[in-house]
Image (spheres, helix red, strand yellow):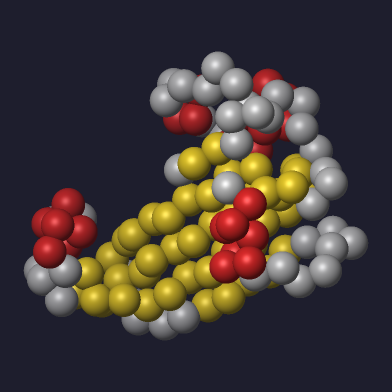
Amino acid sequence: QFFRKEYMNNLSREKISGSLFALITEEYNLNLLGYDEIIRSINLTGKTAQYLDVEDGTAGFQIFNMGYIAGDIPLYFSIEWCAHHVYEFHNHLRIDRKLNPIGRVLKQF
């Protein structure tokens, strides 16, 4: 996970071990508007398959998340991998916000 330092200073691994929502809204007093999430089906190979303790080529997910705060500002970005069934699912959750796919927003980091 990657966080914007100017909004979440003094962040540590211990702080992000609990609820990310509570951390953002309670510890840092930020207004979280929502997030973009893209779940892509992939074949887990190499070090990723090894890390997840599955056979090379096992079906899995690659999950991209980007959370936004007030002012339409991207606050955090994460990429996760997990072993599950194969499918692709796009989820866009937003309050009063125009569609802004992750690809266009990454350049702001």
Q: Residue at x 77, y 26 (%)?
A: 29
Residue 92, given in percent of the width and then of the height, sits at 68, 69
Q: Nearer the viewer, residue 90 or 84?
A: 90
Position of residue 63 in the picture relative to residue 55 (left or right): right
Position of residue 63 in the picture relative to residue 28 (left or right): left
Residue at the extreme top:
10
| Above or below: residue 109 compared with residue 98 | above
Residue 62, given in percent of the width and then of the height, sits at 38, 66
| Above or below: residue 7 compared with residue 85 | above
**Residue 54 seen anywhere in this rendered image of the structure:** no
Q: Residue at x 59, y 57 (%)?
A: 107
| Above or below: residue 75 compared with residue 83 | above
Position of residue 18 in the picture relative to residue 87 (left or right): right
Q: Residue at x 83, y 44 (%)?
A: 70
Residue 20, given in percent of the width and then of the height, sits at 58, 37
Q: Nearer the viewer, residue 7 or 57?
A: 7
Residue 6 placement: quadrant:
top right
Q: Residue at x 22, y 69 (%)?
A: 44
Residue 25, given in percent of the width and then of the height, sits at 73, 31
Residue at the extreme right:
96
Total number of numbered discs in the rendering: 0
Q: Nearer the viewer, residue 103 or 25?
A: 103
**Residue 94 seen anywhere in this rendered image of the structure:** yes
Q: Nearer the viewer, residue 98 or 50?
A: 98
Position of residue 62 in the picture relative to residue 104 (left or right): left
Residue at the extreme front:
107
